[in-house]
Amino acid sequence: MRQKQKNIPIERQVASINTDYVRSVQRQVTHKKSKKIRLFKRLSIFGVLSVIIIGFFVSTLINSKSTLEEKKLQKEQVTEELAKVQEEQEILKLQISKLNDDEYIGKLLRKEYFLSEEGEIIFTLPDKEEK
């Protein structure tokens, strides 16, 4: 008889008691195992979703940072252009105020168009060439 028992797996050699208590303990054990499995699944799903959401936020942050850098460069360029335009505007305002002065207009006409006042003689001298 002993030879037959050696070939039988260990699980079969032990007889299980089939009572209500044993069945309730087995249900509790299987319930705990299934509860652990569900918990692991929930945690893994939560972990994956967390990684996806964090990845989305990081990519959004990187994109907005690069956009901010581009906007800063654009602002610097526009500020420089604004300074140039303001200088040009000041020069034009000065020219406008000068053009409202009759003496300046007369001087400008005499210089550019060789006009003269009564009794005035205009002499043009050649430009000095540096040798």
Image (spheres, grey):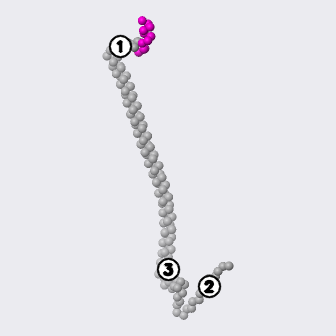
Q: Residue at the spot x=45%, y=46% of the render? A: 58
Q: Which quadrant does the C terminus fall into?
A: bottom right
What residue is disc 3 on? Answer: 98
Please name the predominant secondary structure of the magenta segment in the image: helix
Q: Quadrant of residue 119?
A: bottom right
**Mark sitting earlier along the chain (1/3):** 1
Q: Check disc 2: other Cα within 10 Å, few if <14, some if 14-19, many if 20+.
A: few
Residue 83, x across and y down, in percent = 50, 66
Q: Which mark is residue 126?
A: 2
Q: Is residue 60 left or right of residue 111?
A: left
111 vs 39, left or right, is: right
Mark 3 residue element:
helix
Disc 1 residue type (three-letter): Ile
Instruction: Mark 2 or mark 3: name the one nearer the start of the chain.
Output: 3
Residue 42 within the magenta-colored segment of the rendering: no
Under circle 1, the secondary element is: loop
Mark whose residue sits in front, 1 or 2: 2
Q: Where residue 7 sits: x, y (%)?
A: 43, 12
Q: Which residues are magenta?
A: 1-11
131 or 6: nearer the viewer: 6
Provide the residue designation for mark 1.
17
Q: Pick the quarter of the image with the N terminus.
A: top left
Q: Position of residue 118 (x, y in %)?
A: 52, 92
Looking at the image, which residue is at 48% across and 72% down?
89
Q: Is residue 69 above or below residue 4?
A: below
Is residue 11 visible to us here? yes
Inspect the image, locate mark 2, and give the three-letter code of the amino acid beneath it.
Pro
Question: 6 or 130: nearer the eye?
Answer: 6
